[in-house]
Image (spheres, grey):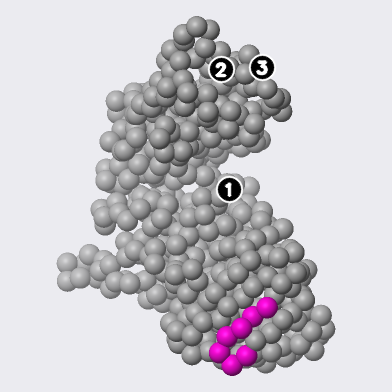
Amino acid sequence: MRRSLPSAYVTSDSAPRFFRGALLPAPRARLLTAAVVVIVAAAVLAGCAGIWPVGGRPVPRPETSDEGEPVLSPYDGPGEGFVADDVPFIRVGLSHGVRNAALSCEGPYTVALFADSVETWSAGSGSKWRFGAAGGGITGSGPGGGFHMDEGTIRIRPSAGALLVFDGVRYRGEVELFASGQGSLTVVNVLDMESYLRGVVPKEIGTRPPEEIEAVKAQAVAARTYAMASGGKRASGGFDVYATVEDQVYAGVDGEDPVCDRAILETAGLYMTRGGEPIHAYFHANCGGSTEGRHEVWELPEVPYLKAVVDSPGEDKFNDAYCSGGSHFTWTETWDGNELARLVRDNLPRTASTPVRAPLGDLKDIRVTARTPSGRVRWLEIELTGGTYRVFGDKLRWLLRRPGSGRILRSAWIELDVERRGGRVAGLTAKGRGNGHGVGMCQHGAMEMARRGHGFADILSHYYKGVGIERGYGETP
């Protein structure tokens, strides 16, 4: 049965169909070629409910102090009453299209090759296995042996409680390798959703003090929702999500934090829905006083739960904004004519809404021709002697990169002051607001709402309009 939820939640008796297993089916190259292989594989991994076991024991809530306050003890798995085998697994692409990879473990581990038959090797703590792309296949070498395979999958499984190490980062769960093309490999971390979030939430919202834990809970629910809605998006690569800003930053065990662990534990299994499906739960650092509709920022369809939201309890979205005390609420960048010309030359072909034809010529003008309801730039026009081009919404951040650093512009909410000389642009100053794309939850605003006593459900309902919060998994024993 399900645990009861506060009345503020909208609950459902049925979870999305993908919760009962990995979020993605295995790519064709990973399918075993005969039924006997499946039987042998089951024998190799005997003692578990599936190929990627989590453990199967419920984990208690954090203890409380004599004063009744929660003690921030280390997190150790899914929340109270959650059977670990019921938590979905997620496939995280750690490295894609590389030629070589090396892995070790902080305890004994097993390397298993699944191809026409199953072969396994045992390795001791600290020993290293190395893998390389060889044509369309993989070679591997390590303690006690080596192999070459033309197709198949390599699975690396640690002993109970041990952590695998890849590129100097420690990871929970298991690691899978397979060929991703001629001369390239893909490395995937396969682990349960709640353990994945432990490596995501601190990297996305930072390490926060206990008094901001409701904001961290909101981040945990948003990150879980984002991951659930992403199943299949990266199917061509053989995984669910990247471990980078292309999806959510994931830093494995080394990124974990006690306050974030507690927030994940206390929201375990909760995700946001609209019409029974997980929403696209975007978030960003600072909205500058107002969030923005998704369709206004990116060339994507409009959705009802991602609208412009004034980030203030009153009408004044600037002076009383929840995020007004956050870093980058306002900022200024200045470019000289030469640097601006270089940015346009290098970045316009990748950001313009229509194909760019050479020669570009000199930069004659740069101007805003349309704005979104919040005030962000919808269309930026670039006038050159070789033609005039337009850049839509958030793409301008990849055009006007920050001077001296090459990092993308903090926000598309800018006012431009153009210096012209001799019919050319000689300099540009941008006065900006906010940090990030501006869609969905404003993290700095969420932190301030938490400090003012708002719970995570209130925070989420402020930024995502008309959504429900459901428990997607976790049966009580």
Q: Identify residue for label 2.
A: 363
68 in relation to 416, above or below: below
Q: Which mark is residue 124?
A: none
Q: What residue is rendered at 47% in x and 81% in y?
A: 105
Left or right of 94? Residue 202 is left
Q: Amino acid at mark 2?
A: Leu
Give the residue displayed 53% in from the left and 28% down from the top.
Answer: 342
At label 2, counting other C-alpha atoms closer than 10 Å, the crowd grade (few under 14, some 14-19, many 20 or more) is many
Q: Position of residue 418 (x, y in %)?
A: 45, 14
Q: Closer to the camera, 13 or 466?
A: 466
Residue count near mark 1 (Cα–Cα under 10 Å), binned few <14, some 14–19, many ≥20: many
Please state which amino acid type lies under the numbered disc 1: Ile
**Element at label 1:** loop
Q: Looking at this view, is 165 or 219 the one in front? A: 165
Magenta-colored segment: predominant secondary structure: strand
* Label 1 – label 3 distance at C-alpha: 43 Å
Foreground disc of the pair 1, 3: 3
Q: Which residues are magenta?
A: 139-145
